[in-house]
């Protein structure tokens, strides 16, 4: 694993890009997704800009809000591991 912090890892970068793409494909703005999740819109921005990482429960809830399968996101993390 490159780097000492998972927030700056290549795997986290792939996951964040995947989450951002899913949000955009579903027609959500950061603000509209934050309303579904019940979080400030800055939370979405920090996740997408790799300033904040998601724990497993947050990741699953994020995927549920986007109506995507969390396993697809995990495949992104593992795709080049």
Image (tube, grey):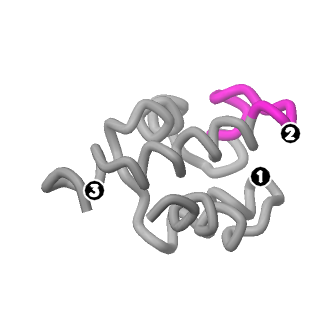
Real-space Cα separation, disc 2 to disc 1, in angstroms: 7 Å
Q: Position of residue 76 (x, y in %)?
A: 60, 58
- Residue lying at 32% horizontally and 36% vertically, measured from the top left: 51
Return the residue at label 2: 26
63 relative position to 58: left or right = right
Estimate how packed mark 3 is, as few (under 14), some (14 to 19) or many (20 or more) residues with alpha carbons within 10 Å: some
Q: Is residue 2 magenta?
A: no
Return the residue at label 3: 6
**What span is in magenta?**
24-34
Contact between labelled residues 1 and 2, with CB atoms less than 8 Å apart: yes
Quadrant hosting residue 60: bottom right
Quarter of the picture containing the C terminus is: bottom left
67 relative position to 11: left or right = right
Estimate how packed mark 1 is, as few (under 14), some (14 to 19) or many (20 or more) residues with alpha carbons within 10 Å: many
Between discs 3 and 1, the one toward the N terminus: 3
Return the residue at label 1: 66
- Residue lying at 71% horizontally and 65% vertically, measured from the top left: 72
């Amino acid at each position: 694993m490159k780097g000492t912090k998972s927030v700056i890892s290549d795997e986290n970068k792939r996951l964040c890009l995947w989450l951002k793409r899913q949000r955009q494909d579903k027609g959500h703005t950061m603000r509209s997704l934050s309303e579904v999740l019940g979080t400030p819109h800055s939370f979405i921005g920090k996740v997408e800009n790799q300033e904040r990482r998601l724990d497993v429960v947050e990741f699953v809830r994020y995927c549920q809000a986007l109506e995507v399968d969390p396993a697809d996101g995990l495949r992104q993390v593992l795709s080049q591991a």
